[in-house]
Image: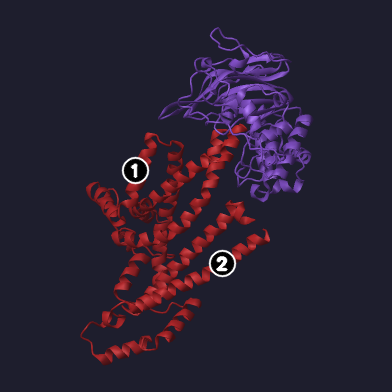
Chain colours: A red, B purple
């Protein structure tokens, strides 16, 4: 590893910290600007001022804002997420321990699906440029890009679980099966494998198909278009012509020389799309009653549960930052112009 | 035009058309010439005269919407036009190679220098052991004056001149018989250009290969080439030894071209010669001789009939009515002394 690459990576790691800091600070501020507060949302409008004050004091919400802010920052640094302000005051870390695996289980297959399907069909469209199949793929990419996620989810639900009932409508697993299923890691697919519970495994997978397909398709359009455009440009690049002029086989030129260069912009896109993927997960989870981070976040925002919202978005921010950091590492690995 | 073992490539009546919405554009029209073994042939002409298209056509690298519409390319006794895709791939790289104008973009940015060279060997000679391939690469790179430690570099770490030398190396690694250098020195600065020109000449001596130098730069051709072909509007108008053509240009276009080259000695009162008119739109090329609308010597005949490429003295071809007879010709034919 050259010293300049090391510097690049170290700089990049340190840049992640202010990135997360800015985001969680913004969440802290926005939550407090929003009308409504956790006390009222929990105790209802008829509660006496004394009771509200007592609860406020117990939750530390009567302290000056800056004290709350630095307290919050310190807790984030020490990974102490505290307890939820409302509805049973459960430790947030426990909540996230259940919700995060659900979201990861939904988003990872979605991302893999969208990346592979998007890149392959984009490259294929570039190869068949201006032929019927190319126009078909482009039309498809605009369609999936412009249909709202929740609508696409609803349509899938109607088609595949109401009209042709082959897939479950919502949730992570059949309710009956839940009664004798004991989650360990809360990654249900993993848990069912670990326990050798194949009926549960099948149930998990069939529950996963529609939501992850919905979420994946919503992001595919961008991948198709970006891959196609970059691939077309790459196939006209001088080094491809030069390679052809020294007799390199066409397939080698397309899938080794051109595609590897196309991966550079695509990787950036994967990093950027990850944030959109998490945003999409919120909508998908709501549509499919998927008990993940997204639905938890929506519920907690309605309750104005400051600590829960801050922690959840903090975790989101952390993941987006980590992924984009990983992409930059990969980027440097693929593109020598960055490495040296 | 003779045909013996001195001749490496024979191009006969080659035409290339671009198919556009406005109709076919005749980029190369009925061109015939030979390339001798071990010679440096300069192909000069203005931008858009079809010289690059001609170079690509020699490798059958013409892509749609363009097409080689007729003609023959005989390379070392074999008809290139009859090659199938497999033969063609083998032919490109092993027999003929090309260096392009922009050294910044003609190497794969994510491939190391040695990977380019080894890939070329492995694609064309799949049985080669990796160690042998590496050894060949090291030997060649040494002869080209590139340090061995540069082999593990990526293209962006090399200077423009060095990249062009790598491109030359890619042509030499498989012992090609002909390298086409398409404006290969145009994007380099003059000093690097001069070095590369020297090197091309040395390579010719050392490897005995032929080089077709395609350029708009007459001065470059004067320095490097043995023979020169002047191209205008898709046709070769004059072909001959470099000294003959520079001392005694015959075609009116060549005369104009040579007098429009700026000289450092030009004094303030002398003005640079500017040819009248503009190169024709090749969607609708002029009738007869394509140069006649701009030609100071044009005769009525010139707009009606296209002259032939005729050998006026041994080794000297001119595509002009001034030097050939026609029953309807209004002036007497100029006899050229050898």
Secondary structure state at the residue bearing disc 2: helix
Work out which quarter of the rendered image holds the C terminus of chain A and state it.
Answer: bottom right
Secondary structure state at the residue bearing disc 1: helix
Height in image: A234 above or below A80?
A: above
Q: Earlier in the sequence, mark 2 or mark 1?
A: 2
Name the front one of labels 2 and 1: 1
Q: Residue furthest front?
A: B269
Q: CA distance from mark 2 to mark 1?
A: 40 Å
**Crowdedness of circle 1 by 10 Å Cα count: few (<14), some, many (20+)?**
few
Asked if both marks, 2 and 1, belong to the same chain, the answer given is yes
Determine the chain carrying the residue at label 2. A
Q: Residue furthest left?
A: A46
Q: Position of residue A119 (x, y in %)?
A: 45, 46
Image check: A299 left or right of B293?
left
Residue drawn at point x = 53 percent, y = 51 percent: A264
Say whether residue A276 is visible: yes
Q: Position of residue B208 (x, y in %)?
A: 76, 27
Say whether residue B132 is visible: no
Which residue does the numbered mark 2 point to in the structure image?
A13
Q: Front-most of A169 and A332? A: A332
Q: Front-most of A92 and B282? A: B282
Count of numbered badges drawn on the protein: 2
Which residue does the numbered mark 1 point to in the structure image?
A139
Q: Position of residue A194 (x, y in %)?
A: 45, 59
Q: Residue furthest top?
A: B327
């Amino acid at each position: 590893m050259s010293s300049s690459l090391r510097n690049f990576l170290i700089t990049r790691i340190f840049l992640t910290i202010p990135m997360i800091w800015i985001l969680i600070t913004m969440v802290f501020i926005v939550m407090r600007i929003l009308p409504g507060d956790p006390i009222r949302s929990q105790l209802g409008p008829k509660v006496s001022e004394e009771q509200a004050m007592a609860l406020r004091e117990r939750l530390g919400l009567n302290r000056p804002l800056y004290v709350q802010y630095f307290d919050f920052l310190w807790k984030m640094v020490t990974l102490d997420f505290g307890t939820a302000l409302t509805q049973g005051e459960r430790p947030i870390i426990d909540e996230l321990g259940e919700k995060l695996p659900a979201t990861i289980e939904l988003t990872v297959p979605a991302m893999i699906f969208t990346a592979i399907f998007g890149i392959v069909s984009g490259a294929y469209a570039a190869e068949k440029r201006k032929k019927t199949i190319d126009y078909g793929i482009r039309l498809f990419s605009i369609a999936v890009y412009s249909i709202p996620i929740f609508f696409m989810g609803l349509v899938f639900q109607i088609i595949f679980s109401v009209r042709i009932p082959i897939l479950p409508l919502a949730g992570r697993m059949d309710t009956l099966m839940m009664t004798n299923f004991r989650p360990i890691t809360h990654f249900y697919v993993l848990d069912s494998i670990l326990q050798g519970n194949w009926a549960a495994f099948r149930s998990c997978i069939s529950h996963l198909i529609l939501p992850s397909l919905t979420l994946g398709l919503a992001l595919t359009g961008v991948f198709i278009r970006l891959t196609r455009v970059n691939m077309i440009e790459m196939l006209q690049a001088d080094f491809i012509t030069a390679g052809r002029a020294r007799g390199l086989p066409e397939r080698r030129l397309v899938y080794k020389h051109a595609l590897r260069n196309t991966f550079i912009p695509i990787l950036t896109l994967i990093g950027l799309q990850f944030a959109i993927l998490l945003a999409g997960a919120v909508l998908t989870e709501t549509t499919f009653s998927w008990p993940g981070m997204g639905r938890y976040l929506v519920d907690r925002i309605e309750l104005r549960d400051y600590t829960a919202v801050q922690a959840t978005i903090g975790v989101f921010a952390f993941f987006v930052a980590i992924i984009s950091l990983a992409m930059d590492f990969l980027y440097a690995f693929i593109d020598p112009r960055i490495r040296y | 035009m003779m045909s013996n073992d001195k001749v490496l490539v024979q191009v006969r009546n080659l035409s290339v058309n671009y198919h556009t919405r406005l109709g076919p554009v005749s980029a190369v029209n009925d061109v015939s010439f030979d390339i001798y073994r071990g010679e440096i042939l300069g192909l000069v002409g203005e931008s858009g005269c079809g010289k690059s298209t001609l170079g690509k056509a020699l490798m059958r690298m013409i892509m749609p919407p363009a097409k080689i519409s007729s003609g023959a390319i005989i390379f070392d006794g074999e008809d290139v036009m009859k090659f199938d895709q497999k033969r063609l791939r083998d032919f490109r790289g092993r027999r003929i190679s090309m260096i392009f104008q922009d050294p910044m973009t003609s190497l794969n940015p994510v491939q190391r220098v040695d990977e380019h060279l080894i890939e070329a060997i492995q694609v064309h000679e799949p049985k080669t052991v990796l160690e042998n391939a590496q050894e060949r690469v090291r030997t060649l790179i040494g002869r080209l004056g590139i340090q061995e430690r540069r082999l593990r570099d990526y293209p962006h770490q090399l200077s423009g001149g060095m990249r062009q030398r790598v491109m030359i190396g890619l042509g030499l690694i498989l012992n090609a018989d002909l390298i086409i250098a398409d404006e290969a020195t145009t994007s380099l600065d003059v000093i690097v250009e001069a070095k590369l020109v020297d090197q091309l000449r040395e390579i010719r001596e050392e490897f005995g290969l032929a080089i077709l130098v395609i350029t708009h730069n007459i001065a470059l051709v004067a320095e490097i080439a043995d023979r020169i072909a002047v191209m205008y509007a898709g046709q070769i108008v004059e072909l001959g030894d470099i000294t003959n053509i520079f001392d005694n240009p015959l075609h009116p276009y060549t005369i104009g071209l040579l007098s429009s080259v700026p000289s450092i000695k030009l004094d303030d009162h002398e003005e640079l010669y500017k040819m009248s008119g503009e190169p024709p739109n090749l969607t609708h090329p002029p009738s007869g001789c394509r140069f006649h609308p701009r030609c100071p010597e044009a005769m009525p005949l010139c707009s009606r009939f296209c002259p032939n490429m005729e050998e006026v003295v041994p080794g000297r071809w001119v595509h002009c009515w001034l030097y050939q007879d026609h029953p309807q010709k209004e002036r007497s034919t100029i006899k050229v002394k050898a």
